[in-house]
Image (cartoon, rainbow, N blue to C red):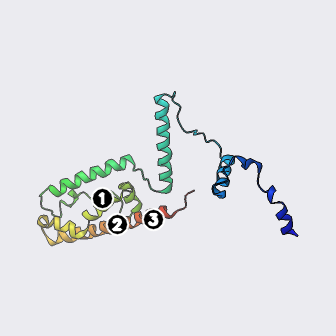
Amino acid sequence: MCVDALMGLGSFFWSPSFTDVDTSADPFEAVRIEYERRYSRPTINTRRPSTTSSAASVERERRQFFQRHAEGLKKRGFLFTPEPTRKSQLSEFQSHWQAFLSDQEPLTMCNLNHIPWLPVPEGDVTEVLRFVGHNFASLRQLQVDWHPDRFFSRLALRLTSEDVRRALARRVNAISQLLNEAVAELRRIRADTKTAPCS
């Protein structure tokens, strides 16, 4: 009974609004075209600056865009802004380090304080990360410079005795281990922020 009823209604399934559509083509294409015509709305780009806007307003919108973008990156953990004092402190330390390496003065127990030691508390990984501004390249360079083998190979000719070497070894090993922990922590932080859900 239902099939007979539907067969009799076959002529009523076609909407009068489809009369302007070409029926010689694919019927599904005709339906798609009609659907797009009915349900598409004209889009208005509200973010587009008007042609009469001043250069100042364009520049303001540009700065706001970059600020929103930077905030989004910082929120996701992809952008770390180093503290300005730390940045200058790091560059100052690096210049002292280069001066120390170029110096040829022999190292004795009396002048070990001439070595530019890292200006962070012993064992404080977060302070090391602040010192380098969460910059992996700077941290990695410190790790290479303070590796015991590299450190002592650079200073081999300047060491005056085995006592000096032993005194330096304890402190250099501690700094090297601290930098290794800082690299591992920075990698963990970056891995956590990459896998964190965006909200």
Residue under the point 23% across and 51% down: 95
**Amino acid type, residue under disc 2 in the picture:** Leu
- Residue 145's tag is none
**Amino acid type, residue under disc 1 in the picture:** Leu
| Most foreground residue, 25 or 62 | 25
Q: Secondary structure at mark 1?
A: loop
Question: Sequence order check: which comes first, mark 1 or mark 3?
Answer: 1
Mark 1 = which residue? 118
Q: Secondary structure at mark 2?
A: helix
Q: Quadrant of the N terminus?
A: bottom right
Q: Residues within 10 Å of mark 2 (few under 14, many from 20)?
A: some
Q: Quadrant of the C terminus?
A: bottom right
Instruction: Tally the numbered discs.
Output: 3
Q: Secondary structure at mark 3?
A: helix
Mark 2 = which residue? 178
Residue under the point 42% across and 53% down: 80
> Residue 119: percent from the left, percent from the top?
32, 56
For the residues labelled 1 and 3, the Cα–Cα distance comes to 26 Å
> Residue 31: percent from the left, percent from the top?
68, 54
Q: Residues within 10 Å of mark 3 (few under 14, many from 20)?
A: few
> Residue 171: percent from the left, percent from the top?
27, 67
Horizontal arrangement in the rendering, residue 30 relative to residue 177 (left or right): right
In terms of image quadrants, where is residue 169?
A: bottom left
* Residue reaching furthest to the right: 1
Residue 93 is at least partly visible in this image: yes
Horizontal arrangement in the rendering, residue 101 relative to residue 183 (left or right): left
For the residues labelled 2 and 3, the Cα–Cα distance comes to 20 Å
